[in-house]
Image (cartoon, helix red, strand yellow):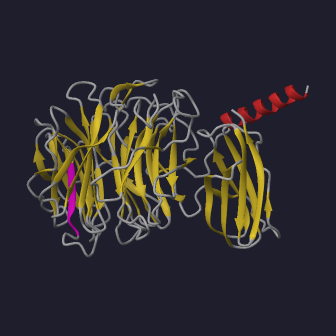
Amino acid sequence: MKFLTTVLILFFNVFLLDNCVFSQYANFRLFPSGFNQIEPSISIHPSNPQILFASAYTISGGTRSEGIYVSTNGGLNWTGTDVCNGIPIQNHGGDPGPIIDKNGIFILTHLGGLQNGMFSNFSTDNGTNWSPNKTILIGDVDKGSPGTDAVITSAYYGRTYLVWTYFVPPYRIVLSYTTNSGADWSSIINVNNGTGSNRSYGPSVIVSPNGTVYSTWASTIPSSPFTEKFIGFSKSTNGGLSWTANETAIPCNGIRTTGLSPWTIRANSFPTIDIDRSGGPRHGWIYIAVSDKSIAPAGSDPDIVLHRSTDEGNSWSAGVRVNNDPINNGRNQFFPALRVDEAGGVNIIYYDNRNSIDSVDVYLSRSDNGGNSFTDYRVTDTRFKPVSVSGAGGGNMGDNLGMTSGNGNLYPVWMSNVSGIFQTWSAIINYTTIGVQQTGSELPNEYLLKQNYPNPFNPETRIEFNIPKSEFTTIKIYDITGRLISTLAEQILPAGTFSVEWNAGNKPSGVYIYVLESGSFRAFKKMILIK
């Protein structure tokens, strides 16, 4: 009877966890409308973090354009339109690249609608009115990504860069830049030349704290399904005029396909890149995240893998598996978006169907130790089933998510059809208290560490605690030998009642010890993971 009771308790606990996964972050649409909004991107004003500029590839019947979504109060309220009014309005074809330069000028890069090519518009009034289309290049192109130099001491301060794939053999990455907020653009410059017959896809560009420009891309096999085999990396120390490229900087085995199972949607392993600008101990470190499979440390299904460089891209670390669900479990993690926040935290959002076979959530994985380990947080409050978007091309649901940060917050953007059509969604995530949720309004009069629930657990559990005054507080997990396994909280918290979750999906069964330290108070309890 005792054994049966234990089994029933374990079953009940696992059932609750599998069916009651929750998000503590309020989800909202940036601009509810009748347009499909896919491939969202977002940028933040370099000197006024209250101003956010997001965009998406917008589709309604025969209309193709780029959404203009703007917040001037740190993401609390948004205004906008689904059609950029830069004339000719018909020459807008999606793949938007929103950026704000040092002067507060909004720049939007995009593909053409009437002509094949790369074009841009600029706005001097926070996105209300837009200049006519500026031609950057006529030709067969794909997937532009902008970045701007906001380093006031840089010799190229204020220069904005754009990288994209030029579909002319050898299918290389090219760049153009503007020094006058998008009024004019330079002639194109090769970022790389390709390796063998491989093609270069999905580039991104960033600017380092000293003004060096970095770009990354996926190097794919030359025929369908164009599987990504390397991540390329290139850098320029003279404002984008010349580049030093490493075509095979990071080996990978990508997921490029026209039918990611079980949804038969188009997917990719385009890399995403960012750099630590915090001024902290990892200042200048470069991070690249990509979706990989069947190559360590990824499993047999798509996982998010992070690589880092501590020497300006001259060498790269071995990969770190970012998502913490059990490896080789047949679930998919894809479309990563990476942001290193102002405190040096490494944050990656991605689609994830760990909680359902056929529907995805958006998860955030965050590292406070330079990418050595990550903690996962569910961002979405409702899952959706990936499907292709009518009018966007065969199997296409979009190619990317987006994220930026400022004001102590992360601002992720993703596409979801939970409203009936695909719309751009977001949440405001305070990364200074991430993972720690205040659960009560009454102020406690004593310290208290409660027993985790459920216990035993598999693979998630919740820890609640009280602190009667504002203190620097930590919650840490140790194994039975005393080895530190995970840090769930490490920050100043106000007085209150709090809870924090731990996902032990990649940990072995056993006894673990969780420790609360707040000021001079210290308490610990045991918990049991049974798989």
For residue 275, side relative to residue 348 (left or right) = left
On-image quarter of the N terminus: top right
Q: What is the magenta range?
A: 158-163
**Considering depth in this image, is 100 or 434 the residue closer to the camera?**
434
- The x and y percentages for residue 258 are 33, 25
Magenta region includes residue 324: no
**Considering depth in this image, is 304 or 388 the residue closer to the camera?**
304
Whether 340 is drawn above or below 18: the answer is below
Residue at image point 42% right, 42% down:
305
For residue 13, side relative to residue 132 (left or right) = right
Q: Residue furthest bottom?
A: 153
Q: Residue furthest front?
A: 481
- Residue 122 in which image quadrant: bottom left
Q: Is residue 51 visible?
A: yes
- The x and y percentages for residue 497 are 74, 62
- The x and y percentages for residue 402 are 39, 49
- Residue 231 in which image quadrant: top left
Name the magenta segment's main secondary structure.
strand
Residue at image point 75% right, 65% down:
522
Magenta region includes residue 162: yes
For residue 43, side relative to residue 27 (left or right) = left
